[in-house]
Amino acid sequence: MSKFGTLVMGPAGAGKSTFCTGLIQHLQNNKRPCFYVNLDPAAEDFAFEPDLDIKDLISLEDVMEEMSLGPNGGLIYCFEFLMENLDFLTDPLEEVTDDYLIVFDMPGQIELYTHVPILPGLVKTLMHGSLNIRMCAAYLLEATFVVDRPKFFSGTLSAMSAMLMLEMPHINILSKMDLVKGQVAKRELKRFVQVDADLIEDDPSRRTTDEEDNRKYRDPATTESLMSGSAFHKLNKAVAQLIDDFSMVSYLKLDVQDEDSLNAILSYIDDAIQFHEAQEPKEPKEMNTEE
Ligand SMILES: Nc1nc2c(ncn2[C@@H]2O[C@H](COP(=O)(O)OP(=O)(O)OP(=O)(O)O)[C@@H](O)[C@H]2O)c(=O)[nH]1
């Protein structure tokens, strides 16, 4: 048997800690043991005290003060420090038995999921080192993003960026579903859950027509011509179409107050982990060298 874990990621304020709290409560209600790891060196006020807290190793506040770094530079420093002191993480995790789900609560700085190469190293340690934890990423995006369609697609690209960077089983989650109100919004949501490229095309908030855009784009005299030109709309459309064509991203809906929603997400996490386990390459057979 292997250990199991989920890495809870997403932009700042997406609801990661609230989801971790809901998930832990749900696991407790169902008598499933859980090991809660906080990897956000700036996090405070936990509903459940973490079993392991990066702040016992290093805190963002201290780093910013002592190293005169800003919040983003400070966070990178904290993770580099963690990578140099991996025993802090790996020793307690070695002790966790196979029946536990290990929940990793991650920071919200988006660069961690897009281009800073620290997380892939961390994931490698967790999944492929002696710990051999079977992992699933849970990437949260706020459901309220759906009111701004380019923002939604841009958030979706950040989810894809995490998928590309981490190369691990991955589920995407629309959080804060309780904030999506009204029948129309709920009906529309289907097109975001199974990402539909036409959302960009029939965006009601688009103020200019293509014709107006084209005129502006051809006029080199204004910055606006570049910022709102149809070239950008075409780019948005092409990116949305790419996501749609390859069915690369779909979302699960999360309402932390709703046990069924938590249960469904937990099932997906379990399935993703097991699917990954089933896909693991087998040990290569010994070659017959006699022939
Ligand atoms: N209405 C509503 N609010 C939520 C929900 N989840 C989180 N929030 C609120 O959103 C804010 C951010 O939630 P957190 O859980 O701290 O988000 P986070 O992603 O951990 O934030 P960072 O660690 O700062 O990146 C808080 O004010 C929460 O109360 C939800 O499902 N519904």
Image (cartoon, helix red, strand yellow):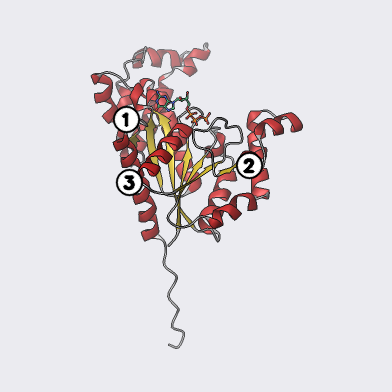
Query: Do labels 3 and 2 touch, CB within 8 Å?
Result: no
> Residue 203 location in percent, x, y?
32, 19
**Is label 3 or label 2 in front?**
3
Relative vertical location of residue 18 with respect to residue 116 in this rendering, above or below: above
Say which amino acid is labelled 3: Ser
Q: Is residue 68 visible?
A: no
Q: Judge from the rendering whether residue 42 lies leftward or rightward of residue 182; answer left or right.
A: right
For the residue with label 3, is its CB less than 8 Å from the closest atom of ligand 1?
no
Kind of element beneath mark 2:
helix
**Residue ID at (67%, 30%):** 61
Say which amino acid is labelled 1: Phe
Relative vertical location of residue 104 with respect to residue 227 in this rendering, above or below: below
Q: Residue furthest bottom?
A: 290
Q: Which residue is mark 1?
A: 192
Q: Earlier in the sequence, mark 3 or mark 1?
A: 1
Q: Which residue is mark 3?
A: 267
Q: Is residue 104 visible?
A: yes
Task: In this rendered view, identify the residue nearer to me: 197 or 137.
Answer: 137
Give the spatial CA distance, label 3 vs label 1.
21 Å
Task: In this rendered view, identify the residue nearer to me: 82 or 37.
Answer: 37
Q: Judge from the rendering whether residue 128 lies leftward or rightward of residue 147; answer left or right.
A: right
> Residue 58 location in percent, x, y?
67, 39
Badge 3: few (under 14), some or many (20 or more) residues near its Cα, within 10 Å?
few
